[in-house]
Image (cartoon, rainbow, N blue to C red):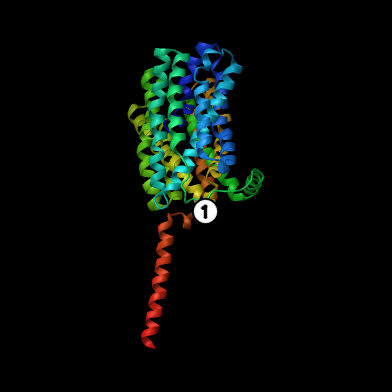
């Protein structure tokens, strides 16, 4: 999980070195990273929908092989089209590993699914924390091509290890639906108002960070940080999110995943507002709030969806909502880059990011309103059943004593 989100959301680090190495304008290059995010979310989302019927191990090993094959590819291409192809494959491989791991591992934990999801998502937070500066150092010391080769080779080995050990629990039911049945199911979902609210809301809950990633490093540099310090500050958002990924899972088990998810999104919104204030102390507070919001919402969206939709379609559910994130990923990187380029400042970009989080919050509230009372782990239901059984037994004992 360290290498899944960490690499595609480090694209702000890629822009300047790749522009210099390949002679491509930054705005044009941002479309390459948009395609990477598109395949990361949408391409892997489609794979997730279809792979609900496939062995997880085979799909993960295929993704590991694809990552290893493209690791040396920058030595073979020097054009915009070549980069477009390479980053499309990279996004698909990274996204596939994420979808399968994120949807399968929590199914091993029936009662503390929120906490378990938080622990597995620590890998994502760690990746967001360490990979931006690692990419920065790799490009500076090794060059673009050799740095790309080194980091993707390590990623491929990590995915290989994941493929060898990851499988669905033997007691969990697995969908036997055909591809046609799955497409029919998705088509039926798309016609419901609840799905429409959630699809757009969850998509925007991903999109705000994609938009922020497009300009955060430049923003921090404009506030007086050096190049390496700015990329480290951006990575610190992911580092802070490690805390909220663990804590958010426990909070979700206690308060319900819906309430905890919305609380996390609210933290992110507050942190984005603070970015408007150009002082170092406020910037630190902003990074902290954004990191807390990022970690909590990234961890809890899966438990939220699992309270709404049947868990036997695990990878299909996560895959469908990954598509929502992918639609936003097509727009956010070039939108963020263009906003900075044509407004001569960061205020418009920050306000746009704020608006995205607010709309996401409202739509998720609307899409999950009917599930609020059921949004807990299995313990309350089991307790209620036990109380009912005890009440029946007491009634029977009382009747027997009266007789």
Secondary structure found at label 1: helix
Residue 253 is left or right of residue 191, and the answer is left
At a point 42% along the width and 65% down the height, the residue shown is 384
User: Residue 289 in the image: x percent, y percent?
Assistant: 38, 37
Q: Is residue 210 visible?
A: yes
Q: Is residue 355 visible?
A: no
Is residue 161 placed above or below 117 in the rendered structure?
above
User: Residue 264 in the image: x percent, y percent?
Assistant: 42, 42
Tell how many labels. Answer: 1
Name the outermost residue toward the bottom. 403
Which quarter shows the C terminus? bottom left
Which quarter shows the N terminus? top left
At a point 53% along the width and 26% down the height, the residue shown is 66
> Dividing the picture into quarters, in which one does residue 390 lie?
bottom left
Name the outermost residue toward the left. 281
User: Residue 310 in the image: x percent, y percent?
Assistant: 54, 51
User: Residue 164 in the image: x percent, y percent?
Assistant: 45, 35
Residue 309 is left or right of residue 179, and the answer is left
Is residue 348 placed above or below 311 in the rendered structure?
above
Q: Which residue is mark 1?
A: 369
Mark 1 crowdedness (10 Å alpha carbons): few <14, some 14-19, many ≥20? few
Nearer to me, 218 or 203: 203
At a point 34% along the width and 27% down the height, the residue shown is 280
Nearer to me, 231 or 246: 246
Is residue 85 placed above or below 108 in the rendered structure?
above
């Amino acid at each position: 999980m360290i290498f899944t989100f960490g690499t595609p959301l480090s694209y702000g680090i890629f822009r300047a070195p790749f522009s210099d190495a390949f002679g491509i304008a930054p705005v044009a290059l941002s479309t390459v990273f948009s395609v990477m995010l598109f395949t990361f979310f949408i391409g892997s989302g489609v794979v997730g929908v279809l792979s609900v019927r496939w062995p997880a191990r085979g799909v993960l090993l295929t993704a590991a092989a694809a990552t290893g094959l493209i690791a040396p590819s920058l030595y073979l291409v020097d054009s915009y089209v070549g980069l477009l192809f390479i980053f499309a494959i990279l996004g698909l491989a990274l996204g596939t590993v994420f979808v399968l791991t994120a949807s399968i591992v929590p199914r091993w934990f029936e009662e503390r699914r929120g906490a378990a999801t938080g622990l597995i998502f620590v890998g994502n937070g760690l990746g967001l924390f360490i990979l931006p500066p690692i990419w920065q150092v790799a490009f500076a010391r090794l060059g673009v091509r050799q740095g790309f080769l080194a980091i993707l080779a390590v990623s491929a080995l990590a995915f290989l290890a994941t493929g060898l050990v990851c499988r669905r629990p033997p007691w969990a039911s697995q969908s036997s639906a055909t591809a046609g049945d799955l497409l029919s199911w998705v088509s039926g979902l798309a016609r419901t108002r609840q799905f429409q609210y959630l699809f757009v809301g969850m998509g925007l809950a991903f999109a705000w960070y994609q938009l922020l990633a497009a300009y955060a490093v430049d923003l921090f540099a404009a506030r007086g940080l050096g190049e390496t310090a700015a990329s480290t500050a951006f990575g610190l958002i992911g580092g802070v999110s490690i805390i909220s990924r663990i804590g958010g899972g426990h909070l979700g088990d206690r308060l319900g995943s819906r309430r905890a998810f919305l609380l996390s999104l609210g933290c992110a919104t507050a942190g984005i507002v603070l970015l408007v204030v150009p002082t170092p102390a406020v910037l630190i507070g902003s990074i902290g709030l954004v990191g807390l919001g990022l970690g909590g919402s990234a961890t809890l969206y899966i438990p939220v969806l699992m309270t709404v939709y049947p868990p036997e379609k695990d990878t299909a559910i996560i895959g469908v909502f990954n598509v929502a994130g992918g639609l936003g990923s097509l727009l956010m990187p070039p939108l963020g880059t263009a906003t900075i380029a044509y407004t001569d400042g960061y205020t418009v970009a920050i306000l746009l990011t704020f608006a995205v989080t607010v709309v996401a919050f409202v739509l998720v509230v609307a899409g999950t309103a009917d599930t609020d009372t059921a949004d807990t782990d299995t313990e309350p239901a089991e307790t209620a059943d036990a109380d009912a059984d005890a009440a029946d037994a007491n009634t029977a004992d009382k009747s027997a004593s009266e007789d």
